[in-house]
Image: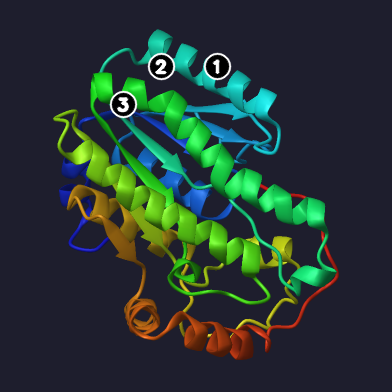
Amino acid sequence: MLINGKSSLSEGLKDFSAVILTGGSSGIGKSFIKLMGKLQPAVVICNLSRRSPDMFSEELKLRHVPCDFGKRDQILQGVEVVLSILNREVPEGRVLLINNSGYGSHGAFLEADLGNELGIIDVNIRAMVELTGHFLPTLKARGGAIINVASTAAFQPTPLLATYGASKAFVLHWSLALREELRGNGNGVHVLAVCPGPTATGFAVRAGVKPGSVPGGVGQTPDDVVEISLRALVARRAVVVCGWKNRWLARFSAVLPKTWTAAIALRVIGRVQSAERLEGNA
């Protein structure tokens, strides 16, 4: 359900003519497509992901661009295709870039697949930085905004999710730094870091977590996260932590020494049971 009605959020997003989204085949990314398409039916949405979202319709102006973010040649090719779509179909109007794609793994680093851990860095960090670098000149020229999806894991060390948590800390701090750089340039590009907590997506399965083993009470749906994100964007927030319980936990983590939060996180995350590794990513 939309907070305070649909009209106010739609009004705040009316100047966007195009959305560039990563990881829209499922979860939070798919919810971004659904809500943006509902609020702004005329907006052209370019989705970069390995799989195509199963939601095509005549009303939804969705353009799927196949892309594996672990392969740089596909990223460069995807950028070229998206820019071509924008120039051909929507040459004017503000552009919203949503860096959403990402994944993680659960378990001790010593026992992890090193290639998979490096893949987390490639997808969660390198692809985000590279895509933003290529699309930012267009955003500066036309006006626009960037949403980078981080995580509540960004606020403390996360043993047993070590690479994932560190990658999301990068997303959070890089987003804040980029926002400050762009803020004084008069280019109209705003940057928002979104920090969801546990969300009902395919992330846990991809990370190798046994279904049902994640504690409840702080989880949200992808639709919740997306609505909160878009409202924070319209309000020109720098960071939004989704859900009041998650906000409390983030504040708590921020004031304690990192060694303490790492020890606490190990006990909490250690209760999560690992499932057999399942292949594939969004």
Does residue 100 appear left or right of residue 282 in this picture?
left
Distance from label 1 to label 3 (Cα)?
A: 16 Å
Q: Are marks 2 and 3 in contact (CB under 8 Å)?
A: no
Q: Amino acid at mark 3?
A: Leu
The type of residue carrying mark 1 is Val
- For label 2, the SS is helix
Numbered circle sitting on residue 180: none
Residue at image mark 2 = 86
At horizontal 15% and vertical 50% (from top left) the residue drawn is 8
Disc 1 crowd rating (10 Å Cα; few below 14, some 14-19, many 20+) is: some
Q: Report the disc number at residue 139.
A: 3
> Percent position (x, y) of residue 47?
53, 33
Tell me: residue 199, above or below residue 53.
Answer: below
Relative image position of residue 188 (x, y in whole percent):
18, 32
Specify whether 71 is left or right of 239: right
**Viewer-nearest of discs 2 and 3:** 3
Would you say residue 23 is visible in this rendering?
A: no
